[in-house]
Amino acid sequence: MPVLEVGKPYLPDRARLEPRAEYNCRGGQHELLLCLSGLTEREVEAVRKGEAELGLVIWGDVLFFLYRFGEAIQWSDAPYSWHLVPAGERELPEPPATTETRALLSVVLVDADRNVVRALGAVTLSPDFTRELHRAIRRQAARPWPAEDYDAQLRRAYERWPDTEAMLAAAVARCLGGA
């Protein structure tokens, strides 16, 4: 994986990127990639300061990583499946070594309109959130690729919860980043 730097392109040879949010656990590391269009300085500062609130929802074979950064980046979500991670990058997160073990979440904020990294940050997940997230990923990895269509599960989840704030009620874990 290339080294990322603030002010440099996220992907070489691209003028712009599609706006998106992706949570990934690969190589045993947690990452939240936010490619936002029309990025504001308030959003950049919210990620830089690490004022994160996080949640985890499990819906069938889909994990939804919920996030909010201060007041600038409102609640949103990023669906995740272990089975969509390239095989060479799949590495299960270790079970927490102690009851106080915290996972580290790397956050990459990219100006999608210009393909430029605007902020790099990291927040720790609470011990409870770490345990729930690692357990959910290990359970997901132990099951075969969904017999039911993954996209259909996503569609049904978004029909049930029209926005991320509605999803919060179903969260199996929530935490403040770094708290």
Image (cartoon, rainbow, N blue to C red):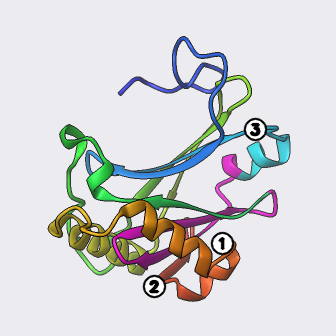
Q: Is residue 55 visible?
A: no
Specify the segment rendered in magenta. Answer: 47-72
Which numbered disc covers residue 37?
3
Residue at the (69%, 72%) spot, across then down: 163
Per the image, the residue denoted by label 1 is 164
Give the farthest residue toward the top: 13
Magenta stretch: includes residue 60: yes
* Figure quadrant of the C terminus: bottom right
Q: Is residue 78 visible?
A: yes
Q: Is residue 168 left or right of residue 157?
A: right
Answer with left or right where residue 142 lies relative to residue 45. Answer: left
SS category of the residue bearing label 3 = loop
Q: What amino acid is at disc 3?
A: Ser
Could you tell me residue 114's position as x and y percent?
72, 23
Comes first in the chain, label 2 or label 3: 3
Which numbered marker is on residue 172?
A: 2
Q: Indicate which label's residue lies in the foreground, 2 or 1.
A: 1
Vertical comparison of 52 with 99: above or below: above
Numbered marks: total: 3
Label 2 vs label 3, nearer the camera? 3
Question: Which amino acid, by three-letter code, is at mark 2?
Answer: Val
Residue at the limit of the structure toward the bottom, as seen here: 169
Circles 2 and 3, Cβ within 8 Å, touching? The answer is no
Residue 155: % across, % down: 53, 67
For image coordinates 48% across by 66% down, the residue present is: 154
Q: Earlier in the sequence, mark 2 or mark 1?
A: 1
Mark 1: secondary structure: helix
Tag 2's secondary structure?
Answer: loop
